[in-house]
Amino acid sequence: MNSAAVEVKHRGLIALLVMAATVMHVLDATIANVALPHMQGTLSATQDQISWVLTSYIVASAIVTPVTGFLAGRLGRRMVFFWSVVGFTLASMLCGVAATLDQIVIFRAFQGAFGAALVPLSQSTLLDIYPPGSHGSVMGFWGVGVMVGPIMGPTLGGWLTDEFTWRWVFYINVPVGIIVGLGIIALMPREQPRRRPFDFTGFALLGIAIACAQLVLDRGELLDWFSSSEIIVETVVAGVCFAMFVIHVMTTDHPFFDLRLFEDPNFSVSLLFTATCGMMLIASAALLPPFLAYLGGYPAITIGLVMAPRGIGMMFSMLMVGRLARRYDPRKIMALGLVITSASMWVMSGFTTDIDTWAVIWTGVGQGFGLGFIFVPISVLMFATIGPALRTEAAAINALLRNLGGSVGIAVLVAMVSQNIQANRSDLAGYINPFNLNLPFVRGDASSLAMWDAELTKQATLIAYLNDFRAMTWFMLATIPMLMLLRRPAPPPGVRA
């Protein structure tokens, strides 16, 4: 594909179009979060019911993502991309006009299903239309949209909701979708479809496993995890279906995934780093807003503003590391990124209730800067030894693992916060009594005890969040030895290092 990549016409425009489609999809995973309270009032829904607006999108996207490689091979990447953009745009418009909760949940599911293919298709398209020597810079450009989108989503969603209505969170996709759809059908080169039988059994088993796993991760904290029969049933179904899927793909003649992908050690190890990257980006972005709102007293608009620089740090490092990856060993760049990210998380573990705005900003910039140093090299290493025919399928698996990593990270860290608050509160409560000489202002009357009860909960919550930040620090550092499992690929023939 090296020569073909150089001969593609209008590849700069194609790159902009596929990136616009990617940003649309990743933004919509988080842009509606801020608008949920407004939707809840308009649609007369409870907090549990309105959460399905997010859950339906995530679950539908997770189910459809793995099938992207097959569809692109069978129908051609150009047609799959075009119809994905068309379906996503129509579903966005329907979400904007939805009048009931049932309607918006269904339309969000369609939006997630059609948008699922956009991220892996955009990644494989950019890798195919540019020569291997440019893949570092191209992946930096692509990573800006994929990783910065979830950070900027809440900020943009809050502004649209405040200035207009929550419906504009979805309407904003319509003009972008029209332009991208027309551009894709006019400029993207045609591909020769490949005949390949579809593994319906494998798809069904994997789809059920992913759907149940996402429901467990998304609703577990709300339903008190395994105290709920729903969570127990979904966990069992997910485990059984995934085990059956593994057995099926190992024994069938035409498995759902091309098993040649997993023979490449760089691909398999890179998937672990992809999940780690998604976990750190998405989970930390989910933890910080409630931390700042409850403990720092920050209003929603201020939270969006102080978190935005994290995206700027990530953008800068991704654009810079694309050039560095051609000169230096990508594994060393990733090690530096892991250290920088860990250092910023460690500083966050020292926050107090008197949170300085600039401390939040510069630790966010450092975290984004470090993640950029991880994300781009791992994308280069993952696809360096994978042939063009398998790139779309590899990109789909990569996208799935990144999203699942984020879901697992959110579920685990939120559960840790909830459990630690209770444990910390129980430990601290023993010191709050009128006989403690270190607390001379404790009295036995109701007003004094109520004041100390509120302060007790606040301090217990602070410790719980700081423990999470500390856990993320050690987790990132623990992944550094895995870099030794990656191999630095040789430069392609005719391409200077």
Image: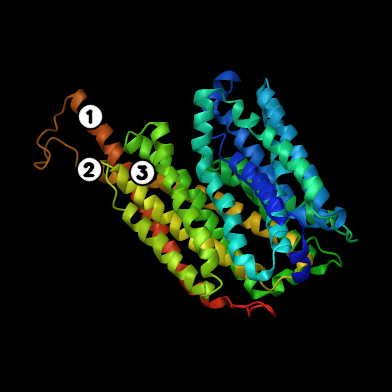
Find the distance from the CA under tag 1 to the CA under tag 2: 16 Å
N-term mark: 1 or 2 = 2
What residue is disc 2 on?
430
Secondary element at image label 3? helix
Question: For residue 451, which numbered disc appears in the image?
Answer: 1
Judging from the image, the colouring scheme is rainbow
Towards the viewer: 99 or 330: 330
What residue is disc 3 on?
421
Say few, some or many: other residues with alpha carbon within 10 Å of mark 3 (under 14 / 14 to 19 / 20 or more): many
User: Residue at 74% of width from left, 60% of height from top?
Assistant: 393
Secondary element at image label 1? helix
Given this view, does label 1 or label 2 mark the residue nearer the observer?
1
Q: Position of residue 316 (x, y in %)?
A: 47, 56
> Do the numbered discs 2 and 3 sit on residues whose CB atoms are within 8 Å?
no
Q: Is residue 124 above or below residue 19?
A: below
The three-letter amino acid code for the residue at tag 3 is Ile
Left or right of 376, for residue 180: right
The three-letter amino acid code for the residue at tag 2 is Gly
Find the distance from the CA under tag 3 to the CA under tag 1: 18 Å
User: Residue at 81% of width from left, 63% of height from top?
Assistant: 255
**Residue 110 in view of the camera:** no
N-term mark: 2 or 3 = 3
> Do the numbered discs 1 and 2 sit on residues whose CB atoms are within 8 Å?
no
**Residue 277 in view of the camera:** yes
The three-letter amino acid code for the residue at tag 1 is Met
Find the distance from the CA under tag 2 to the CA under tag 3: 15 Å
In which quadrant of the rendered view does residue 140 lie?
bottom right
